[in-house]
Amino acid sequence: MAAQRKNILGVGMIMAIVFIVILTVMFTPIFGGKNAFEAADNFFNSIAKGSTYFIPGLMKDSESYNGKTIDVTVTLPDKAMTATAVKLFKASGALVGEGESLRVAGDLGQISRAALQDADAMFFNRGKQVTDKYGVPEKEVLFTWWTAFKEMEKDLKRQKKFPEAAWLSNASKRSLEVGYNFYRIETRKVSTVAGMLLFSLVFYVAYTLWWGYAVLFLFEGAGLQMKAGAKKEV
């Protein structure tokens, strides 16, 4: 019995060592300058990106807001973002009254399309196009649009213009957030990376089970066992 436990303990130790070695390798930046976890995150994001492109449909929907003038107050967190917002709104054809808060009056369809066009450029990693357009870093542009949309949505709700507010919320979530979050990530179709996807899933399951059995064998080899507690008789 002692010899058997010793053998089981040895197997558990070998499995644990192999697990730790692989884990150490996974933390090293050998995957194009990234570790395995960062590379895997980018890999799955690149697959997810292909199913999040809603901008063409939103562009079409924005046409229903052509000619709908809005007059809203937009309060932004700092002077730098306020200055950027002035550039964005003016480029969309809106009239902007400047101060601590911005008073923005313009065509909702035009304002929406200006933001959607910037989100589309970011989605396809054309950040330089956005930077050159406003003279502002591309991610700052999209973050300013997102923040401004939130403020516009609040004011439209205060004015009881709920359809317009809902439209801005939808456009923000499905274009601005997507363009910002997936910026600089290449799009991949599942069909082109099916082998890598299958390997990743199989490796994850196998690696998890490997550690589970390593712990099991270590405990069993050390003479520790898990037993169900005795049931109390009533």
Image: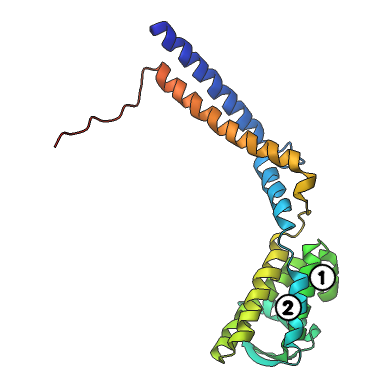
Q: Give 66 or 28, whichever is nearer the viewer.
A: 66
Q: Secondary structure at mark 1?
A: helix
Q: What is the x, y in percent for residue 74? A: 63, 85
- For the point 82% across and 73% down, the residue is 135
Say how the picture is coloured: rainbow
Q: Earlier in the sequence, mark 1 or mark 2?
A: 2
Residue located beneath label 2 in the image: 84
Q: Which of pointers 1 and 2 indicates the residue nearer the eye?
A: 1
In the visual, does 163 lie left or right of 93?
left
Q: Secondary structure at mark 2?
A: helix
| Quadrant showing the N terminus | top left
Q: Residues within 10 Å of mark 1 (few under 14, many from 20)?
A: many
Q: Looking at this view, name the residue that lies furthest to the left.
A: 234
Residue located beneath label 1 in the image: 130
In the visual, does 220 lie left or right of 106?
left
In the visual, does 12 lie left or right of 44?
left
Q: What is the x, y in percent for residue 194? A: 74, 42
- Amino acid identity at mark 2: Thr
- Amino acid identity at mark 1: Val
Q: Residues within 10 Å of mark 2 (few under 14, many from 20)?
A: some
Residue 100 visible in rendering:
no
Report the disc number at residue 162.
Answer: none
Q: What is the x, y in percent for residue 78? A: 63, 77
| Up-down relation of residue 166 to residue 214 (above or below) | below
- For the point 58% across and 35% down, the residue is 205
| Up-down relation of residue 73 to residue 188 (above or below) | below
Mark 1 and mark 2: Cα distance apart in space: 12 Å
Q: Please tell me how many numbered marks the rendered image carries.
A: 2
